[in-house]
Image (tube, grey):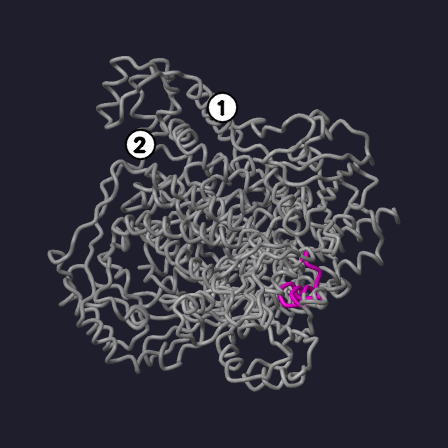
Amino acid sequence: MARVEEWTDVIVVGAGHAGCEAALSCARLGLSTVIFTVSADSIAMMPCNPHIGGSSKGHLVREIDALGGEMGKCIDHTFLQSKMLNRSKGPAVHSLRAQADKDAYSMRMRQTLQNQEHLTIRQMEVDEILTDASGKLTGVKTDSGAIWHCKAAILCTGTYLNARCICGDMVTYTGPNGLQSATHLTDSLMRHGIGMKRFKTGTPCRMDGKTIDYSKMIPQTGDVPVVPFSFETDPKDVQIDQAVVWLTHTTEETHDIIRRNLDRSPLYSGKISGVGPRYCPSIEDKVVRFAERKSHQVFVEPQGRNTNEMYIDGMSSSMPEDVQIEMYRSVPGLEHANIVRNAYAIEYDCIDARQLNRTLEFRAIPGLYAAGQMNGSSGYEEAAAQGLYAGINAALKIMGKASLLIERSEGYIGVLVDDLITKESTEPYRMMTSRAEYRLLLRQDNADLRLTEKGFQAGLISEERYQSFLKKKGQIEEETARVRHVMIGACEKVQDCLKRCGSDPLSTSASLAELIRRPELDYFCLSEIDPNRPDLPVQVQEEVNIEIKYEGYIRRQEKQVAQFEKAERTLIPDELDYAQVPSLRTEARQKLMKVRPSSIGQASRIMGVNPADLSVLLIYLKKMRGERNSEG
Amino acid sequence: MWKIEDTDTIAAISTAVSESGIGVIRISGPDAVEIADRVYRSPGGKKRLAEVDTHTIHYGFIVEPEGDGNPLQSGISGASGKSADVIDEVLVSVMRAPRTYTAEDVVEISCHGGVLAVTRVLDAVLKAGARAAQPGEFTKRAYLNGRIDLTEAEAVMDVIESKNRFALQNAVSQVQGTLYRKIEEVRKEMLYQSAHIEACLDDPEALSYEAYLPEFSSEVQQWTKELSALLATADSGRLIQEGIKAAIVGKPNAGKSSLMNLLLGEDRAIVTPVAGTTRDVLTETITVGGMTLVVTDTAGIRETDDLVEKIGVQRAKGAIERADLVLYLIDSSTCIDIEDREILNLIQEKKIIILQNKSDLHTLTDEQQIRRMASEAGLGDDIPVIPFSATEKTGLDELISAIRTLFFDGKLSFNDEIVITNARHKELLKRALESLRQLSKSIESQMPEDFYTIDLMSAYEALGEITGQEAGEDLVNEIFSRFCMGK
């Protein structure tokens, strides 16, 4: 039998949220790209919750958009409801979250992939990776035996590697939603010396909407007006008729049912060995770990306009079917509801991401990249961000260009990648704003200001978009400077305006900036006493407001960043042999060899490497440089 | 978070404490000369170190650096330099880069006022803008700047490592200490509050912090109060700043007042051969061997019906309770009796030095008997027993060296471990307090609570550097373990 043999630039394995961004970015940069999936009907599927965005995840989506990714645009066209979370808090924690029409999202992303030049979709399981004698990636082999030669491959296998779904006593060896799992690739990776581990996650049941009694629930509506995710979406286009989400709660009866049946929970009987995430606990976890809570919130959420299946958010579970039915029906409004799809837990293989370098490329296998849940993260947004980042960097490397790197001080993507490749994770990693040390600088509103330049340099941002970005930047700078210089006198009109805003009158004149900094005031409400204010887009006004209002805090964080960058810029050469560094403690030596940090800054974030170890390393690096200079 | 700190200006006491009491404070870094100028006054009041030649030595005074908005109010009175603000009379060496130990600008201040003055000079220099150097940091810079070669550098690594090991021991030995306990207590509360705030921000639909704000704000005040109190006691180490509180105890007429007089060098306490003469408590501050002792002469401890003497005995017991050190005087011309044993019970928890008052008469109690008694009382075998004669004025040197061993650990040089560690602690406490001050400001100006955790975690990390705890994933772990997160 003749074997198929093909040549392409980039292979992407998996067409979930990471795979789609990876494939699109490579194809858009002009590289011939093939994306493999076990089901071409399930591209960009949302197998768990129906949200895009949320706390800190909304930041990621905006960053993806600023770099030229697709997720923000896709959700802007397919959302059902949208909210800006934490609006009453500081700008750093404002987070956009949308309810997605799952099918519409998946369909639109599939069309985007299909319409993308240089991109081919192929339904086939990838079984093996192929390398040359030096260990460099040369291609992949599919289940059909076909050989695909490529310059780079990006593994975005999500939860499919040796996946196992658990619902009480019922165990099926499938990926999410009954899809075929990938059973060969793990072995191939292990043969190439890649260390694997096993994680677990779960999802609640889906219920038949017409059997739910919404009169017992509290309706949750979306924001008016809606703010789009993408910086390129016209806000006018997202003012839609929004869907309603329903809030109910578990009862003591629910908790009793769970406690009574704990011995039948695969989690507590030891049937599940994978490590699950603490931030997204199953309902049985919540009941056990937070025993004092009498009730937990349950959100009943639509999954799309063309389905009446509702997602029972807050009650993921791996209890047996009969317990699930009893437990869900103990929740007010769900007394007579029918389950369409059971809740289940899923176990899967993933890698220890400390085997990757800063571009998400395997150190041991040049040309091979990994992104998404394969790297031990969780969430659609975390996956998409990594897919885009790995895709861009794989493409840039093939094209012989400098990598696109994002520091922790530049974006949540930087924090995400650095955490994954530096810290040992014992559970799926989820983004949080508290993980970002400089979150006041890494806001969702200024993602474009932070990253458009990088996206443009990489080649994913059009000239037109770049020019409008430059214009916005200029307007912000100009207006900020103007506001700093405008003086406001204590005239009657001013006092009147202040009074209406609930602010104390002026005793002498003050700068406009000073007034903006008062807690009860902002840039917007002072427009009437600022007669020379130019007519500016609302996004520009918002940036000016934040820059002025929180100036002291922003400057303080910038100072911290300057300190931080010093350590980040002190690079550690890839070839450093830690065995040769004298006086390192054994623990530090082992940890350093495992992570192989690229800078002293990254080394300082490894648990178990202390300041004395870093001093030792600094001295050794200095010595190395000295010797190299004298040789040269 | 850990930072590279190779470019700021550092300072430390660079000599071990010596009998002569001379100490050198070394300042190294780009601002060394400028910082020195902030604390240096020439006799004429006009010389500026920034203008002197390199590798020159200058006589003058160290004064408190100018405070906030009080330029030159220090009132250096003309040529004498004598003023309330003068800390010490000094010689200052100015050495500019690169021909210095660290290859950076270096200023060395030689002062002669003993430990207290040396510490105060260092404090002044830190106040003027230098950072307290870490153990081995001068040498590290010397290497990084190419001043010393590989062999020497490897020795440096050993030094860094061994200091680090010591720091660890120090942390362990302080596990029982109030400082450590107190700080960990405050950190625990800080972490909980941060996690609570962050959990609410992360899942605003399930959790709200609003109702906890008043409680939080009072907690911040409480932390500020507690850390300020700590800062006051940890101020360069109370033992150094305030001196070691030493109580002289013993049976009536054992020669306590004579010892006091010997230490003081003058006849200030009444010495008479009648038992029970010293009826009150007498306290003197003296500097011996570079250490400050606050010595209290207690009345002879014995049960008595005499009202005046009874009050004296009560006060003596109080003095012992407050003391860091008990100097227990035994008269070798009398026998050990029940009263000695009672005294031993009273002082059991203390650091003790037994002074055997050598009699010019006959010896009834020798060192062996004293050791046996001490051991029977459960005081251990390593209690120093020092023969001593009040009339012949012998034994004082041995006493001084025994005190130094007890408090400043004879194995280690005094400067590195006590002064520097404490100067670092002090700086870190100040940093934590500064963060709390910022936090209070944010609360006052009604900033949203996401601003609070930034400063709160800074304070948490600064305190962690004192107790040697890495922050790592503390916050994320606390959020997950304490709060029910996620839908």
Dot 2: chain letter: A
Instruction: State the SS at label 2.
Output: helix
**Residue A593 spot, x, y in % from top left:** 67, 64
- Amino acid type, callout 2: Lys
> Disc 1 designates what residue?
A474
| Distance of label 1 from label 2 (alpha carbons) | 24 Å
Give how far across and how far down residue B312 sits, in percent: 44, 66
Q: Nearer the viewer, residue A300 or A296?
A: A296
Label disc, if present, on residue A236 of the rendered structure: 2
Q: Residues within 10 Å of mark 2 (few under 14, many from 20)?
A: few
Q: As drawn, is B289 to the left or to the right of B279?
A: right
Asked which secondary structure carries label 1, the reply is: helix
Q: Position of residue A589 (x, y in %)?
A: 68, 65
Confirm whether residue A136 shows in the render. yes
> The magenta stretch spans which residues?
B400-416
Which marked residue is nearer to the observer: mark 1 or mark 2?
1
Residue drawn at (41%, 55%) of the image = B190
Q: Is residue B225 magenta?
A: no
Magenta stretch prevailing secondary structure: helix
